[in-house]
């Protein structure tokens, strides 16, 4: 949780400082500000998403520092839902295939969190090899 939160916060900060970097990382075409149409709010959307990522990252870090396992549990179904939606976005052609790595990251995070929570709830003698 802590590492994921830190990564989300750092990527959010990067997106606020350089939205085109985030577009490039996700495989989207990056267009210079002066070449964008006046009605193109891509950069604004990326910055709003980056602010959400920064906030979410801080939430995750705080949850990890305070060991809020209930919060961890809530993330599993929602990260799975995020995987599903992001995968559909790629399959329907709204995003480039490279965007699927974001979906996969969410699924792996959900699975890892679910396994860790399951393991931690087992009685102590069952945890030993």
Image: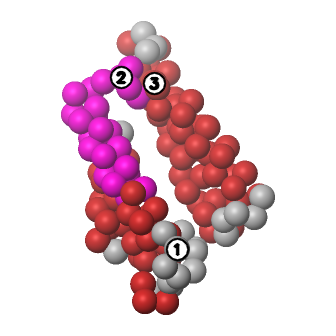
Q: Main secondary structure of the magenta part?
A: helix
Q: Check disc 2: other Cα within 10 Å, few if <14, some if 14-19, many if 20+.
A: some
Label 3 sits on residue: 73
Q: Which residue is mark 1?
A: 39
Is residue 128 visible in this depiction of the protein?
no
Q: Quadrant of residue 44?
A: bottom left
Residue 51 in the image: above or below residue 42: above
- What x and y, as percent, mark residue 107? 58, 44
Q: Residue furthest bottom?
A: 35
What residue did someone put label 2 on? 69
Instruction: Please state the extent of the stretch shown in magenta in the rendering.
Output: 49-72
Q: Position of residue 95 (x, y in %)?
A: 66, 65
Determine which quarter of the picture holds residue 66. top left
Binning the other alpha carbons within 10 Å of mark 1 as few (below 14), some (14 to 19) or many (20 upward) gives few
Q: Residue drawn at (34%, 74%), measured in percent from left and top? A: 18
Residue 37 relative to residue 83: left or right: left
Do the residues bearing badges 2 and 3 touch, measured as CB atoms within 8 Å? yes
* Element marked by disc 3: helix
Residue furthest to the front in view is: 38
Q: Residue at x 30, y 24 (%)?
A: 68
Q: Secondary structure at mark 2?
A: helix
| 32 to 26, vertically: above or below | below
Q: Quadrant of residue 94?
A: bottom right
Which residue is painted at 77% across and 58% down in the image?
91
Residue 57 lies, in percent from the top left, at 32, 47
Q: Which of pointers 2 and 1 indicates the residue nearer the eye?
A: 1
Query: Gap in Å between the C-alphas at discs 2 and 1?
Result: 44 Å
Count up the numbered dots: 3
Taking 103 as reference, is 75 left or right?
left
Chain-order first, disc 2 or disc 1: 1
């Amino acid at each position: 949780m802590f590492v994921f939160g830190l990564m989300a916060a750092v990527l959010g900060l990067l997106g606020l400082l350089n939205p085109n970097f985030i577009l490039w990382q996700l495989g989207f075409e990056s267009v210079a500000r002066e070449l964008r149409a006046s009605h193109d709010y891509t950069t604004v959307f990326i910055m709003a998403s980056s602010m959400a990522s920064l906030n979410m990252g801080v939430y995750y870090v705080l949850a990890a520092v305070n060991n809020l396992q209930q919060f961890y549990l809530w993330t599993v179904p929602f990260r799975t839902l995020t995987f599903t939606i992001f995968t559909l976005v790629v399959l329907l052609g709204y995003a480039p295939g490279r965007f699927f790595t974001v979906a996969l990251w969410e699924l792996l995070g959900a699975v890892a969190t679910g396994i860790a929570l399951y393991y931690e709830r087992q009685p102590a003698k069952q945890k030993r090899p």
